[in-house]
Image (cartoon, rainbow, N blue to C red):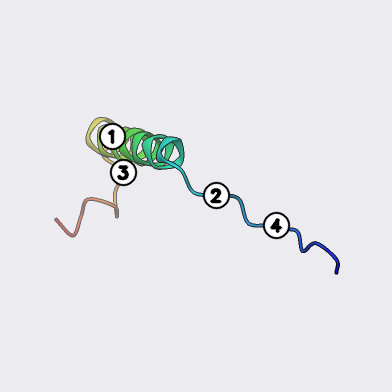
Amino acid sequence: MKKVLNRVPEVTGSFWIIKVLATTVGETAADYLSVTLNPEGVTRGM
């Protein structure tokens, strides 16, 4: 019998740590730019 290769990588704890950190940095950067640049149309609805 042929051995079937698994092409999907295993999701580990380090994956979730990197994912949470990347999401947090992205959200923080977006909030900072939204407050400092105050682009019209983005914050108008608030």
**Where is the N terminus found, in terms of image quarters?**
bottom right
Quickly name the residue at label 1. 28
The residue beneath circle 3 is: 39
> Where is residue 39 shown, x and y percent of the image?
31, 43
Q: Secondary structure at mark 1?
A: helix
Tell me if mark 4 has few (under 14), some (14-19) or many (20+) residues whose alpha carbon lies within 10 angstroms of its own.
few
Which residue bears the numbered disc 4? 7
* Quadrant of the snapshot with the C terminus: bottom left
Q: In this figure, which residue is indicated by the disc labeled 2?
A: 10
- Whichever of callouts 2 and 3 sits on the residue coming sooner in the sequence is 2
Q: Relative to residue 18, is residue 32 drawn left or right? A: left
Left or right of residue 18: residue 8: right
Spatial CA distance of label 1 from label 4 is 34 Å
From the top left corner, tell me how far across and down residue 15 is, in percent.
Answer: 46, 40
Q: Secondary structure at mark 3?
A: loop
Q: Amino acid at mark 1?
A: Thr
Furthest toward the right, the residue is 1
Comes first in the chain, label 1 or label 3 = 1
Q: Is disc 1 in contact with disc 4, using a CB cutoff of under 8 Å?
A: no
Residue ID at (80%, 62%): 3
Identified by mark 2, the residue type is Glu
Mark 3–mark 4 CB contact (< 8 Å): no
Check if mark 1's residue and mark 2's residue have beta carbons within 8 Å.
Answer: no
Task: Point out the tag, 3 or 4, that comes first from the N-terminus.
Answer: 4
Mark toward the start of the polypeptide (1 vs 2): 2
Question: Reading the chain from its start, which is encountered first: label 1 or label 4?
Answer: 4
Q: Say what amino acid the circle numbered 4 marks.
A: Arg
Residue at image position (22%, 35%) is: 35
Q: Nearer the viewer, mark 1 or mark 2?
A: 2
> In the image, what residue type sits under mark 3?
Pro
